Image (tube, rainbow, N blue to C red):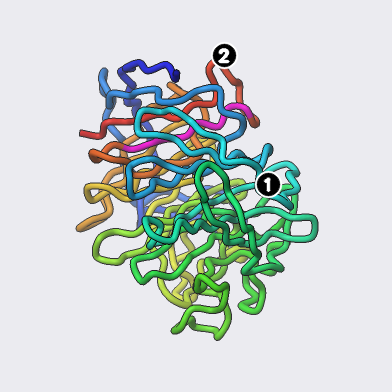
């Protein structure tokens, strides 16, 4: 049985630059900020329950209609089912996955009709490419793995990999530039993009370029979320200067590799919030209660960023408490489920990696 415990998590102060505050000039030097915001320190943070531990490089967790969840293990290429109390069932390996560095079995997204069709969609690295596949959960096994979109260039890093169904019923995917920055500006390429496709893998109706591309100019998108009003958000890894949280709009250019962070150039969409890379390295995100919650790897934090009705001062939660954080999703009863990522590039403790249940109040 998984061990369960309650842990008071500290909230630490941190300085960052918020939308319309600062930009990175072309020489990469940090400019003077027009405004900065500092999250207040607190002696008590959200209550945290450890649901499951001893996970082997977990990457994504997606909640199902019955309150359980599906989780991917990147390097083992297995899918786990996790009960609301943290008990796990191994549904088996996904065939054709070729792990390499940051590549492997990445995102998972249940069908909007999962309660009746039991279909799931996965983003994975195969022998020749990154691809999106469709599969079915039958009992305690994952079966019928079928590619629906192939040809996304792969590399040992910058593979993107997060997938999620939007409120319009179409499947969105964040891809990376695979280390070839210029492809992010090519709207014919699937890399360095956010894609939007049907469940058959075809370009969704209304896409701006007549192909799967929804937005472009991205370096490495690993977080996708929507507010109830349909506003879409995405997190993005910067290179050396700025990590980003962006509001995603159809057909827009987010600048990479021509700019990193705010450009103050109408040709590009500026981030809502940007962080120094040491404070973030953002992966999964989730929307809850007017805020985007962002899992930070290098920053070893869960960032809470108010975005509705306006962008407010971000707050840093769980700082240096559980190590690197890979993903966050909204779970039953309004809690957040958060995945740690210390068995890859971290300093794993004897219980890592873990799935945490966080009470955000």
Residue 328 location, x and y as percent? 41, 41
Q: Is residue 56 left or right of residue 168?
A: right
Q: Residue at x 61, y 64 (%)?
A: 192
Magenta: main secondary structure equals: strand
Quarter of the C terminus within the rendering: top left
In this rendering, is residue 254 above or below 53? below
* Identity of the residue furthest to the right in this view: 127
Q: Whole-percent x and y of residue 189?
A: 66, 73
Compared to residue 158, the image places residue 150 above or below, namely: below
Give residue 350's mark: 2
| Side of 187 where 234 appears, left or right | left
- Alpha carbons under labels 1 and 2: distance apart: 24 Å
Q: Earlier in the sequence, mark 1 or mark 2?
A: 1
| Residue 276 shows up from this direction | no
On the rendered image, what quadrant is the N terminus found in? top left
Q: Visible in this render: residue 342?
A: yes
Asked whether 311 or 249 is in front, the reply is 249
Which dot marks residue 205?
none
Q: Callout 2: 10 Å neighbours few (<14), some, many (20+)?
A: few
In-front residue for pair 260/70: 70
Residue assigned mark 1:
104
Residue 334 occupies quadrant = top left
Residue 133: quarter of image = bottom right
| Residue 339: in magenta span | yes
Q: What range is drawn magenta here?
A: 336-343
Helix, strand or loop at label 2? It is loop
Classify mark 1: residues with Cα within 10 Å, few (<14), some (14-19) or many (20+): many
Query: Which residue is at 40% across, 25% downward?
Result: 51
* Left or right of 151 on screen, residue 274: left
Asked if residue 309 lies left or right of residue 347, the reply is left
């Amino acid at each position: 049985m998984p061990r369960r415990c309650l842990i008071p998590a500290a909230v630490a102060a941190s300085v960052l630059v918020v939308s319309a505050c600062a930009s990175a000039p072309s020489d990469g030097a940090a400019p003077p900020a027009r405004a900065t915001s500092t999250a207040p320190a607190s002696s008590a943070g959200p209550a945290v329950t450890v649901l499951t531990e001893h996970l082997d490089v977990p990457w994504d967790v997606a909640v199902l209609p019955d309150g359980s969840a599906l989780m991917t293990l990147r390097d083992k290429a297995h899918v786990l089912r996790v009960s609301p109390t943290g008990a796990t069932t191994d549904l088996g390996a996904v065939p054709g996955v070729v792990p390499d560095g940051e590549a492997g079995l990445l995102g998972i997204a249940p069908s909007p009709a999962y309660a009746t069709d039991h279909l799931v969609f996965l983003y994975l690295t195969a022998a020749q490419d990154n691809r999106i596949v469709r599969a079915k959960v039958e009992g305690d096994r994952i079966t019928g793995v079928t590619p629906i979109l192939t040809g996304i260039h792969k590399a040992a890093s910058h593979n993107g990999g997060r997938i999620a169904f939007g409120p319009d019923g179409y499947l969105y995917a964040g891809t990376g530039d695979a280390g070839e920055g210029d492809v992010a500006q090519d709207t014919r390429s699937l890399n360095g993009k956010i894609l939007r496709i049907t469940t058959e893998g075809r370009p969704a109706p209304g896409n701006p370029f007549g192909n799967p591309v929804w937005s472009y100019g991205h370096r490495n998108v690993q977080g996708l979320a929507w507010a109830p009003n349909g506003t879409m958000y995405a997190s993005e890894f910067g290179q050396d200067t700025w990590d980003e949280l962006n509001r995603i709009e159809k057909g827009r250019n987010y600048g990479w590799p021509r700019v990193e962070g705010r450009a103050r150039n109408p040709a590009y969409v500026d981030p809502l919030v940007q962080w120094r890379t040491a404070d973030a390295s953002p992966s999964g995100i989730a929307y809850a209660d007017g805020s985007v919650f962002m899992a930070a790897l290098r920053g070893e934090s869960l960032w809470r960023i108010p975005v509705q009705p306006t962008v407010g001062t971000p707050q840093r939660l769980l700082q240096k408490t559980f190590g690197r954080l890979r993903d966050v999703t909204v779970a039953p009863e309004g809690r957040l489920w958060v995945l740690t990522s210390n068995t890859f590039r971290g300093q794993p403790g004897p219980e890592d990696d873990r799935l945490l249940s966080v009470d955000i109040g």
